[in-house]
Amino acid sequence: MEYHRHYYFFDEDGNPMEMRRWISRMHHFGTESIGRTEVGEHVVSTVWTGVGCSCEGPPKIYETAVLVAASVDHEAKEMTDVPHKEHVATRKEALEVHARVVAALRAGTLTFHDDETVVEW
């Protein structure tokens, strides 16, 4: 498959979209959350960004990030640091990464030390 390297914005299926359409969608709907799981002081968030993060292969338009909650207060939870991020091309991959990161956090095999992520899959 030939990938459209001159496009930077993509729909959920990886098809190119014009920037105007992407901006309009972001303005009205924002990023599409496809997963959000709290694990202790962390929140694992997986979203469709629609922005291609790769020049080779399919555009990596989904992002899973581990966020550190600044407060345990659920009504006003402010998110800070992002000690771990992964970008993938498909919704299926994004859901798999989300589940893997949540499982690793729960098992204690995903830890963070001085701006470095240590993962023991």
Image: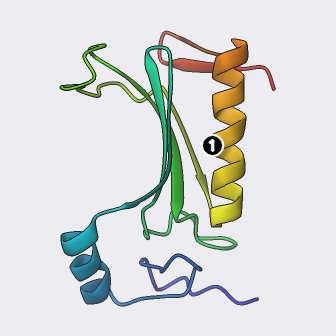
Question: Residue 57 at what x, y percent from top left?
Answer: 70, 72
Question: From the image, which quarter does the C terminus lie in?
Answer: top right
Q: Quadrant of residue 77?
A: top left
Closer to us: 101 or 120 = 101
Q: Measuring 22% from the left and 81% from the top, which residue is drawn there? A: 24
Q: Quadrant of residue 101?
A: top right
Decide if residue 82 is on the left or right side of residue 1: left
Q: Is the residue marked by circle 1 packed among few (<14), some (14-19), or many (20+) residues within 10 Å?
A: many
Q: Measuring 29% from the left and 87% from the top, which residue is drawn there? A: 21
Q: Measuring 49% from the left and 69% from the top, which residue is drawn there? A: 52
Closer to us: 88 or 53 = 88
Question: Residue 33 at what x, y percent from top left?
Answer: 43, 55
Question: Residue 116 at what x, y percent from top left?
Answer: 55, 19
**Which residue is labeled 1 in the image?**
98
- Residue 109 visible to an observer of this rendering: no
Farthest right residue in view: 121
Q: Measuring 47% from the left and 79% from the top, which residue is drawn there? A: 10
Question: Residue 13 at what x, y percent from top left?
Answer: 59, 80
Tell me the SS state at disc 1.
helix
| In the image, residue 111 above or below residue 94 | above
Question: From the image, which quarter does the N terminus lie in?
Answer: bottom right
- Residue 12 visible to an observer of this rendering: yes
Decide if residue 62 is on the left or right side of residue 77: right
| In the image, residue 33 above or below residue 72 | below
Farthest front residue in view: 75
Decide if residue 88 is on the left or right side of residue 28: right
The way the protein has been coloured in the rendering is rainbow
Q: How many marks?
A: 1
Circle 1: residue type: His
